[in-house]
Image: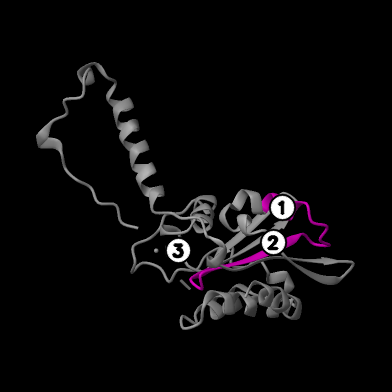
Amino acid sequence: MADSSDEVYDLGDRGDDRPGLEDADPDLVDEEVDADDDVDDDDDVEDALEDDVDFIMALYREDGTPVVAALDIDLANDLDDLVAFLQRLPGDNGASALVSIAGEFFAAVRVRGRHVHVALSDVYSAENWSLARDIIDFLGIEIPDEDDEDGLVGDLDLFADQGLSEMDLEAICADLDEDSDTLALEIADEIHFGPQARKVAEAFS
């Protein structure tokens, strides 16, 4: 399954000669510094380009029939937009999306009414990719130290009612030698969307 380290420079001894700083509210000054840090963090995060997206697809059932549809590449870079799109689909039991980026990570998103469930195969991918960063923000978690986690995070039982338990999902993602697109298609197989998902994935090739 599958992530950032900020360098901190100590300028305390050099002081700060910004005009008017002596009159400034210290809390506001700290907030300015924090805001700058946030911008710096986001500078390393990139949107996936067309060549980066292995595939992005929606999966849902209509009158019991599995349906898989390719989605617009732009939805591979914004979790809010992806969720909003899934909410408009006519799934019998909500709609899901599988997204694989550059063979490095996949995201699984499931929307049922107002309930949103997400899983990310590699938390460390949030250091580099917009969608992964959106997901860890949604989950309210931090990117851990490299040795702290195996990488898989989120709602690992999001497909439990479709035949893929949390343990099964962990077992799929434990295969570190496989690319993320292969792992995501294994998930599609387990939740009974395999043939349709593989046909859509081939269209992205």
Under mark 3, the amino acid is: Ser
Q: Do the residues labelled 2 and 1 touch (CB within 8 Å)?
A: yes
Identify the residue at image location x=20%, y=18%: 22
Under mark 2, the amino acid is: Leu
Q: Do the residues labelled 1 and 3 touch (CB within 8 Å)?
A: no
**Which of pointers 2 and 3 lies earlier in the amino acid sequence?**
2
Identify the residue at image location x=38%, y=60%: 144
Residues packed near mark 2 inside 10 Å, few (<14), some (14 to 19) or many (20 plus): some
Query: In the image shown, does 77 or 50 lie closer to the viewer?
Result: 50
Q: Nearer the viewer, mark 2 or mark 3?
A: 2
Instruction: Say which quadrant the C terminus sits in.
Output: bottom right
What is the secondary structure assignment of the residue under circle 3? helix
Name the disc covering residue 18, or none: none
Identify the residue at image location x=40%, y=68%: 149
Residues packed near mark 1 inside 10 Å, few (<14), some (14 to 19) or many (20 plus): some
The x, y position of residue 201, in whole percent, is 66, 74
Please state the extent of the stretch shown in magenta in the rendering.
83-105
What is the secondary structure assignment of the residue under circle 1? helix
Name the disc covering residue 71, or none: 2
Q: Nearer the viewer, mark 2 or mark 1?
A: 2
Name the disc covering residue 85, or none: 1
Identify the residue at image location x=60%, y=72%: 166
Is 96 inside the magenta-drawn segment? Answer: yes
Q: Is residue 70 left or right of residue 14?
A: right
The residue that mark 3 highlights is: 125
Under mark 1, the amino acid is: Phe
Residues packed near mark 3 inside 10 Å, few (<14), some (14 to 19) or many (20 plus): many
